[in-house]
Image (cartoon, rainbow, N blue to C red):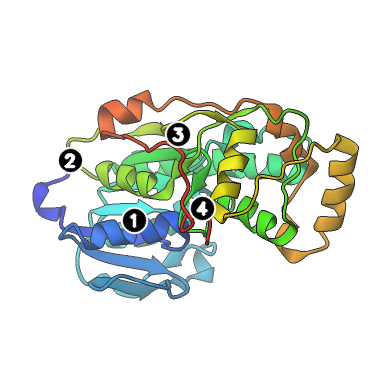
Amino acid sequence: MVVADQVMEQVGVLGGGGAVGDALLRRLAGSGRRVTVFSRRPVAGVPAGVEWRRLAVDKGSGGAASDVEAPSAIALWICIAPIWVVEGYRALFESYGAQRIVALSSTSRFVKGDSKDRAERDTAQRIAEGEERLTRWASGRGVEWVILRPTLVYGGGRDRNVAEIARFVRRFGFFPLLGEASGLRQPVHAEDVASACVAALGSTAPRNRFYTLSGGETLAYREMVARICRATGRPARMPRVPLWAFRLGVRGLRLLPRYRGWTPEMAERMNRDLVFGHEEAARDLGFRPRAFRPTPADVGG
């Protein structure tokens, strides 16, 4: 199936919050397309010209969300909701006549699959199952799909990676590291992810493919934290802490709501290389991610 040029002006977005959502809606709003955002709750900061529609949940269909009205066809969709819930919106896609769906997943399915922490393993499994269910449904319906797997996303001060480290530094004045913290990372900016999403909508973009979206620079975890510290305007205080102290500290931090998702395994990964190539995305989608140079705006400053 080739998506016709005349439907390129109409795009549906499932979800819309977070760093990628902000960047995506701004980019789509400035592209001349008509954009409709679907979510169960209002999306803050929706750009002028972007329509928001509330989703209803039809409990009789297994909790799948649907829209009451489908006044016009929407052939192109970008889904930035968690990948494990996207397939549950099949009634919505079908009612609008979806022809191509671009969905965000994550390389976490490969990173956390062997974690000692059960919650992290469960997350990896949900990602893998979400990808499989979406592709199976779409292929069965003749709907083109593209799934993008970004690495460590940052930007806008609203992510759970770089911005979370920055918040810790502002609160405590330092960030602890395990050993050398030499594991390699590839932070990818939310705006670069949003650009890849839009590129994947194009009629000439390959269909039914997975793409990795990694950052434009590979650097050690320690250097990544140092640059985050500089972006906050704070000194790069990064004391080395033994694993037993990390485990004890995390146990205490998890008593605070903001840090309930922290695990000792996060510290252990500081010395593990998490590197993924994005050559295919560069070739097919023109993906050219920036180097990691976080600004105060990127870290919520």
Residue at the image position 36 percent from the left and 37 percent from the top: 289
Residue at the image position 47 percent from the left and 71 percent from the top: 40
The amino acid sitting under disc 3 is Ser
Depth check: give the residue in front, 116 or 65.
116
Q: Which residue is mark 1?
A: 24
The amino acid sitting under disc 2 is Ser
Q: Residue 67 location, x and y as percent? A: 37, 70
Q: Which residue is mark 3?
A: 214
Q: Which residue is mark 4?
A: 82
Label ID, residue 203: 2
**Label 1 with label 4: CB-CB less than 8 Å:** no
Q: Residue 146 location, x and y as percent? A: 35, 39
Quote the CA–CA distance across marks 3 and 1: 17 Å
Element under disc 3:
loop
- 10 Å crowding of disc 2: few (<14), some (14-19), many (20+): some
Q: Residue 294 location, x and y as percent? A: 48, 47
Q: Is residue 136 left or right of residue 13?
A: right
Q: Is residue 153 above or below residue 186?
A: below
Q: Earlier in the sequence, mark 2 or mark 1?
A: 1
Q: Earlier in the sequence, mark 1 or mark 4?
A: 1
Q: Is residue 189 left or right of residue 264?
A: left
**Label 2 with label 3: CB-CB less than 8 Å:** no
Q: Earlier in the sequence, mark 3 or mark 1?
A: 1
Depth check: give the residue in front, 175 or 41.
175
Element under disc 2:
loop
Depth check: give the residue in front, 247 or 144.
247
The amino acid sitting under disc 1 is Leu
Q: Earlier in the sequence, mark 2 or mark 3?
A: 2
- 10 Å crowding of disc 3: few (<14), some (14-19), many (20+): many
Q: Please tell me whether mark 2 or mark 3 is closer to you in this view.
A: 3
Q: Please tell me whether mark 4 or mark 3 is closer to you in this view.
A: 3
* Residue 47 in which image quadrant: bottom left
